[in-house]
Amino acid sequence: MRNYLSLLIVSLCLFTNVNAQTTHNTPLKISGKVVDLSTAKPVEMASVVVLNSTDSSVITGMYTNATGNFSFNNINPGIYVLRITFMGYDKLEKAVKVVEGKNSFAGTLRLNKSGKELNTVEIKAEKPSFSMQIDRQVFDAGDMINAEGGTGTDILKNIPSVDVDIDDNVTLRGKSVTIYVDGKPSPFGDAKTALQMLPAESIDRVEVITNPSAKFEAQGGGGIINIVLKKDKAIGYNVMFNVGAASRGQLNGSANASLRIKRFNFFANYNGRYEDINGSGISNRENLVADSNNTRYFTQKSTNDNLNGNNGGRFGFDYYLDDRNTFTIAQGLNYSYGGNDENIHLNNLDEKLQQLNYGIRSNNSHYNNNNSNTSISYKRTYKKPNQELTAYASFSNNTSNNNSQYISNYYYPVVDTVYRSSDQKNRGDNGNKFWNIQSDYTSPFGKKGKLETGVKGTIRKIDNDYLALLYSKDSLQYLPSLNLSNKYNYEEDIYAAYFNIANAIGNLGYQVGARAEQSYLRGYSVTRDSRVDRSFFNIFPSVFLKYNLPKNQNQNLVFNYSTRIDRPNFDQLLPYINNSDPQNIRTGNPELRSALTHKFEMNYSEWFPRTNNYLSGGVYFAKTNDNIDRISTLDTLSGVTTTRPMNLASSENMGANFSYSWKIQKWWKFNFNVNLEYNKITSVTINNDNLTYGFNGNMQFKLPLRFSAELSGHYRSPRLQPQGTFKAMNGMDLGVRKEMLKNNRLVIAVNVSDILNTQQFNSHYVTPTFIQDYDRKRVTRFVRLNVRYRFGKMDPNLFKKKKQQQEEEEEKQEEQPRPNNERGRL
């Protein structure tokens, strides 16, 4: 850790002085004029702010001159939004596109006086539902009416190629994925926890990076999903309240507020959620090799009731030291709790389907989890456009405890007498500390070149103490089980450095880079006196090529290559035995190795500016060596299956996808995605392949009286797993939104999830010793009501005007004559 801090300090010093002799980019300009709608006279001192069209962040701003004109220099190619405000007039926004080598004129912008209705159509910026950038697909979360009142998990369910299973685990094209929030790894534990803590209303967009460049950490064979939160740093204030309820027993509420005063931008948010969800499962297994009880068929049915809740928030401030230096300090806190009551009924049958014995098992558990995260970041910009230095450090501390009890009774048929029983209590305490320190530097060179470089260090320490107590009929007390209990200490250290060089030759843009990562994985089981000591050094190259077609700058071809890694995580390496389901035991594997993936992609995209339609299509290929997956084996004596993670020889997947965003009418938009994929898994004992296809689609309607609606659906055919397939999945959702009050300050949304009640998680296993079908279902069809109210004012002159008004009032009071009695005393 000390060596890494030294490296970080040296790097910061070097970055601050590097590239002083590089050439400036060719400056591009956005200009225009602001006038009164009715009189056509120029509006002087109107505020004109340039916003990023994807996240509404402020890029620059100025006031119009005496002739109403404005002009911004040093603007990079891209799509922007101009926001024009002036006291006594309605706010106006307009989208502007800046093309390489060409200045942009926004035209004459006509402001309408407040209180009057426009006789013409107001020009507003409309973000595409999705777009393709050189290294990512971007999806607008604001369009997802069906996710209103939900969480980040509900947003991802609407993203093509992303699968969310019944336990809210997220995969991308069937591979593990890393979740980022605002470009940084989520500070709140695993991906599932991070997504459940993010209200859908706080998310602006989702960036799916299937082939991340060297700038991003290499963990996650599927890639990275970056969740970008809504933010507005313009001077003023903004407040939003959100409350909702669902028929499945869910309540949710959140509050977000920001306040910008001069050099300070304060922000805070709170969110709370409670839900009570019922579920069920059924498993049918045929033993191809009979066990000691002569069991040929085994069936298991379960019902469960899951209760979960969390309360948390984040607060902090940005401090603008000057126009080029910004510090940000933030603190996050979260408390979550929950429990699960499950009843399992087991049946063992012979080859004639005659019952041999049966069992009843009850599992009860509850947990508490406390998480805190502290972060500080620094950003410095330079006179040269797009040159910047950032530094970031964060510390997260998570503590949790859980308690559970398993009670089992096994009976002979007919006589219904207990011949075997067990009673087990478990207590687990877990501590997780996570440090993240990184610094990045970007500088342009030449006419179109750009250099990116940086360093990063992450340290994660986990202390897990799991105690299993078995009830003894002899001593009439609970005694520790050495076989099931485990005290385990784990540390994961990863240090990295990277560089990217980007430039262009004519219409061909390229970016090449490499990332070096040194990782250490160390674990020690106190209970078993066993150690895990792994170290890996890897170099991950990446290449990105983008070609803009000469005759149409709105068309481009993108090719990219990168390497990714799946390191075994804490849970996979942990030498534990999970016997909550006595016939299907789960364990860890301390012998796991990392899996390396080589990924290739080629994509074509075209934007149609006149219709605002968007088309994207591409092909991809990925090969993983030492692929990590779960393998189940059957004990032919006891009839119990054990599932553990293992390294397979290799896996390959190749596919093609096609997406189209079609604005059929001004009020009717259709988004559609199709994916076709071939998967193959090969090892000494397993050789399995299949062809998978799937599609996502949604229709969005803008209706009269400020109503809007969305109908979405998805289907995915069976997907390959090492010992069989995950069965097909499909579902359909409907949402309606009503906007009210001025500037749509009040929004009411009602959505129906899984209208046809078809969403469930099913799997089919085929092995030399058994064949098994496992189906799980939770309540997925429900109605949710959500109400959102926001208010605020964004105006660079807001506080100046208040101060000026206060000074004028004070001057008036001083000028007023004093009362007669006062003058008499004088």
Image (cartoon, grey):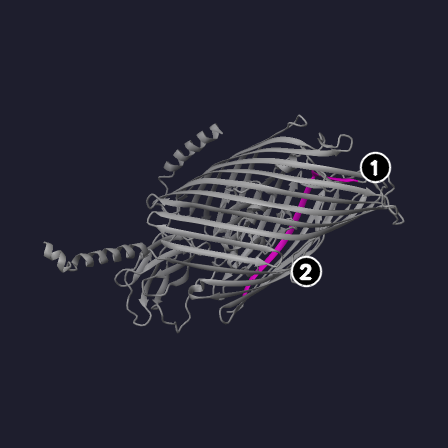
Alpha-carbon span between mark 2 and mark 1: 40 Å
Q: Nearer the N terminus, badge 2 or badge 1?
A: 1
Q: Residues within 10 Å of mark 2 (few under 14, many from 20)?
A: some
Please name the amino acid that badge 1 sits on: Leu
**Does 600 sit left or right of 352 as displayed?**
left
Q: Is residue 654 magenta?
A: yes
Instruction: Residue 158: name its quadrant.
Output: bottom right
Up the image or down, 489 lies above or below 196; here it is above
Q: Which residue is mark 2?
A: 757
**At label 2, which amino acid type do we have?**
Asn
Q: Residue at x 75, y 47 (%)?
A: 344
Q: Is residue 371 above or below residue 42?
A: above
* Percent position of residue 494, x then y: 54, 34
* Part of the protein shown in magenta: 640-662
Main secondary structure found in the magenta portion? strand
The residue positioned farthest toward the right in the image shown: 352
Residue 188 image offset from top left, x and y in percent = 54, 43
Residue extending farthest top? 529
Element at badge 2? loop
Q: Tell me if I can see residue 78 in this picture.
A: no
Magenta-drawn stretch contains 217: no
Residue at disc 1, secondary structure: loop
Rendered location of residue 288, percent (x, y): 84, 44
Mark 1 Cα-neighbour bin, 10 Å: few <14, some 14–19, many ≥20: few
Which residue occupies the foreground of this view, 565 or 342? 342
Q: Which residue is mark 1?
A: 637
